[in-house]
Amino acid sequence: MLDAYFLQQLINGLTIGSAYALIAIGYTMVYGIIGMINFAHGEIYMIGAYTALIAITGLAALGVAFLPIVLLVALICAVIVSSSAGWAVERIAYRPVRGRHRLIPLISAIGMSIFLQNYVHLAQGSRNMGFPLLIEGGFRFGAEGDFQTSISYIQITIFITTLICMAGLSWFIAKSRTGRACRAVSQDLGMSSLLGIDTNRIIAATFVIGAALAAVAGLLLGMYYGSIDPLFGFIAGLKAFTAAVLGGIGSIPGAMLGGLILGVSESMTSGYLSGEYKDVVSFGLLILILLFKPTGLLGKPEVEKI
Amino acid sequence: MLVIEDVHTHYGKIEALHGVSVEVKKGEIVSLIGANGAGKTTLLMTVCGDPQASSGRVILEGRDITRRPTAEIMRSGISIVPEGRRVFPGLTVAENLHMGGFFNTKSEIRKSQQHVYELFPRLKERENQRAGTMSGGEQQMLAIGRALMSKPTLIILDEPSLGLAPLIIKQIFEIIAKLRDDGITVFLVEQNAHQALKLADRGYVLETGRIRLQDTGANLLANPDIQNAYLGG
């Protein structure tokens, strides 16, 4: 039944799902290359949102009101700060313990996550802060009096920005020299260093790319939700991680698909059942998919041809 | 060109090489033969710095590389065709070759790629195919081609004939001879002792982590002990 209400849920779901996908890419790329989950990734996203908010507030204080400039500056600041944080996480929590038991980097990454969360608590306070919408208004369609489907400009912005980021990333991975090296390192790290490639730099690059995309998501979802707090990254990180696993962890198209599926299933549940059930449905979906396809929707089983 | 001096290599507490010395001179083909578990691959990998020697020295063109990181060693004119080929299965043939020439300019890459395609016309046909979908022989050609992309002065080959059909093996050994004629020094490890010694200027026999014999390839082939132990009588 394709009525206005359904369409509305679909639009909401695709919006939030595309943002999940942006965050999920960070999980999936890091997993693809070192086979580990970056547990501080949610915090990287949260830091991106805070940095964007600080930049927006700063620009307002300076009297800069031209919207494209404000958005661009906020975006650049968020990307720079989050990327640095992503780089630092790799440098501090992963690189020194690489090659040890898998639990060790896991624990050090959780430590990084706790540290970053509490640092923001201290520096920014633990109350939630209002995030200006900046992009107001939208389209409405449907007859007066009936349920009207609306698409806000911010939703369109989120969707288009995500599309641009995905297209850019896909090009980068498929065509660029560093992207090719990323794929090579993820397929055979040892062989890559036997070709003279500095694998540490490639690994750091994947953390930085994932962090940059998370920062974009931080700015977009900050505006969309209208408020942020230091725990902002926790739930989003969990959702994005679910999206990455759902789509097949290690697969970039999988992360994109997983994000969209998760977003749509959440908004459909909220719209037709109740908001309380949306996490039940999304995690239930995850369990179902993993039961029938343990590698996720687009994940490949690890086979080696000898 | 390459001097390995009294090298000891450990895996954890287990010593795999007990003081191995090997020299590969410029323009030579040197073959290292030995049974399974003798430490052949360990010796080659020690040259590449993965694992590093716990004592002794590895000297490449007069420079001590014993303690250098793998990536740095592999950027100094040396290439490896590793055991099991290890092509990147999800990358196309052309992409695999590009990875081999990672540090060269685009025009150098184009030239080396052309050269590899002349050596292995089959690779040209499969240019856009994923390496993981190719046959073992084709993958071996790709692994050799990839190693040539960086224009090495020394190429190390670890069991290039393993698991391949006799016809392909013949072709691979012809290519190895051709590499030497092109001025590339070759350090070859093989279980296929007959072929490897026939081709080699000099050979070494490695037994449980020690060099037991060294001589010219022809003399080793004629040696009755070697015939009994490695050439099936």
Image (spheres, coloured by chain):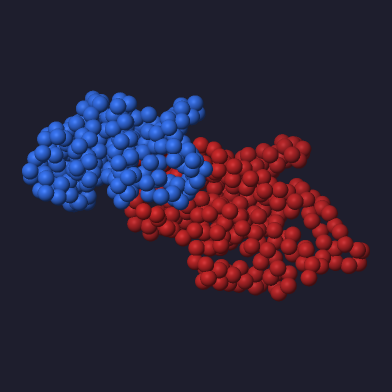
Chain colours: A red, B blue
For the residue pair A230 and A12, the one nearer the viewer reads as A12
The residue at the point 14 percent across, 50 percent down is: B232
Which residue shows up at 22% across the image and 45% down it? Answer: B192
Q: Position of residue A49 (x, y in %)?
A: 62, 49
The image quarter containing residue B154 is top left
**Which residue lies most toward the left here?**
B224
In the rendered image, residue B96, in percent from the top left (x then y), is placed at 45, 41
Q: Is B57 above or below relative to A75?
A: above
Residue visible at 56% across and 52% down in the picture: A252
Q: Is residue B232 visible?
A: yes
Residue A57 or residue A302, whichever sits in front: A302
Residue A247 position, x and y percent, is: 56, 60
- Left or right of B151 in this view: A39: right
Q: Residue furthest bottom?
A: A273
Residue farthest to the front, as pictured: B167
Q: Position of residue B113 (x, y in %)?
A: 45, 32
- Work out whether residue A51 can be spotted: no
Which sits in the foreground, A221 or B94?
Answer: B94
The residue at the point 22 percent across, 50 percent down is B11
**Vertical comparison of A83 with A304: above or below:** above
Q: Tally the numbered discs.
A: 0
Query: Could you tell whether B130 is left or right of B215 in the image?
Result: right
Q: Is residue B185 left or right of residue B216?
A: right
The N terminus of chain A sits in image quarter: bottom right
